[in-house]
Image (cartoon, rainbow, N blue to C red):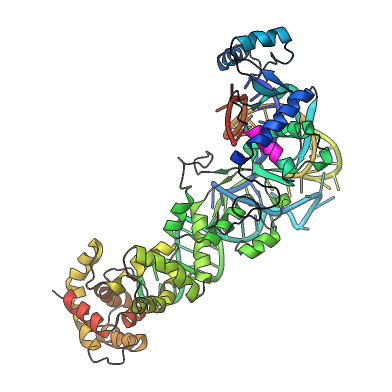
Amino acid sequence: MKWLGLNWDEGPEVGGPYGPYLQSQRLEVYTDWANTFLKNGDAYNCYCSTEELERRREAQREANQAPGYDGKCRSLTSAEISKYESEGRKPVIRMRMPDGETRFTDLIRGEVVFEHKFVPDFVLMRADGSPLYTLAVAVDDVLMKVTHVLRGEDLLSSTPRQIRVYQAMGVASSDFPAFAHLPFVMGTDNAKLSKRNGEVSIAWYREEGFLPEAICNYLALLGWSPGDDRENITMEELVQLFTIERVNSSPARFDMKKLEAINGDKIRALDIEDFLKRALPFLIEAKVISGLAEEIALVKKALPIIQERIIRLKEVIPMLGFLFVEQVEFDQESATRIGEADAQKVVGVALDSLEPVTDWNHTQIESALRGSLIDGLGLKPRNAFGPVRIAVTGSHISPPLFESMELLGRERCLSRLKSAIR
RNA sequence: GGCCCCGUCGUCUAGUGGCCUAGGACUCUGGCUUCUCAAGCCAGCUACGAGGGUUCGAAUCCCUUCGGGGCUGCCA
């Protein structure tokens, strides 16, 4: 979250007036409230064993009834209780759902109603005395004065239980937090995005070279839109423009292509200093450079010519690699091409025309090559510069040739042309 | 099974009764430009799940239906 630029202004690490913020440090609070509910009759001890519950649920299913706690222990006599106790049973604390219904307004779905006959009594405390999520979140909401509960739509149906706890705590409905249940982000195969489905580890995105602001921008657009046609949105604008009300209620599908498009846009929008700062770790990590000042200076000069050519930061590695190797290695296709007779001839002529060039800049290089290859040999630019590109950069795909040659330097260019000739 | 949520181009979306013969973006296809690859520019393909209503008029309101998803735990 920090890497994404997402911060919280209250909670673990930063503190705040309603701590402690770690659930493990609040166990006593939950226990106290559970006991209060017990005392007030909002909750009761349930002695049913897991096996018994399982059996009854199964029976309900077979009878085609809604499975759920049947309320067996709702009103136990003291005789029954002591019987269970003498058997050594440890009770869980279960919340009593009264008759009626729970009605609330979800900020993005509107009014939602749940009839309580479909909301069985639920467990607040395990037999070992540890609290359940349902208890803990609700208690924390109230005690920490939470104003908005924004979460995945899978929690929608647990909201009545949460509200039940608020009520048992004596909170007026006007003081309940506002609820908004966000739609899921699905993978391309129509299943909820998860560990087994798609690249969900945020570390993967960082290693690939996605910019945090690009990810935030893209994610914001999944299920939300500013209302007009703008899509390239900065973090600041996002904070400014975002409203829960404009969040869509339907699930969205994750689209890597769109993320890449946005990432490319964000990369192109970087100023060189910033671009350099972000690209360097990739080059160092890949051992393209070791981090020397002169290497960094060369990278900085090279960045402008590759900025609009990469989608992910990681691509600076193959793009700039040719600048930092003693000798280029040809990939298969390039090796084949450079070996052809025509190509060999081109390289030879190029070398001859380049040798007299002493003022080694891309303008001079270009005019020398155009003079010898285009005018001299009558070649099409494509056929003329292709072999030179391969000889110099090692690949038929590279940054702009003349600029690349300028950056590489005269000596290295000439020697690479020489060694390309068989 | 029951309850709940959701349903506009392939994808993300705009759209809240007439401005919609449905707009934008990404993808895809074709073209221009061009030293490769990109970027940029232009053009094109493609959508209101279906069926009924309501209305002078519906993507927008109502009903039904189909489809997708979630929940149905001493998980969160």
- Residue A251 seen in the current view: yes
Identify the residue at horizontal 78%, vertical 37% (top origin). Answer: A104
Magenta stretch contains residue A138: yes
Identify the residue at horizontal 71%, vertical 41% (top origin). Answer: A141
Pick whichever, B33 or A184, lies toward us: A184
Quadrant of the image for the C terminus of chain A? bottom left
Magenta stretch contains residue A165: no
Residue A10 lies, in percent from the top left, at: 66, 53
Q: Which residues are magenta?
A: A133-140
Residue A107 lies, in percent from the top left, at: 74, 45
Identify the residue at horizontal 69%, vertical 41% (top origin). Answer: A140
- Residue A109 seen in the current view: no
Vertical side of A355 occupied by A394: above or below: above
Q: Quadrant for residue A250, please give it.
A: top right
Vertical side of B70 occupied by B72: above or below: above
Per the picture, the main secondary structure of the magenta-coloured stretch is helix
Vertical side of B16 occupied by A79: above or below: above
Residue B8 lies, in percent from the top left, at: 63, 46
Q: Is residue A25 left or right of residue A384?
A: right
Quadrant of the image for the N terminus of chain A? bottom right
Identify the residue at horizontal 35%, vertical 72% (top origin). Answer: A291
Q: How many marks?
A: 0
Of all residues, the one furthest to the left in this rendering is: A422
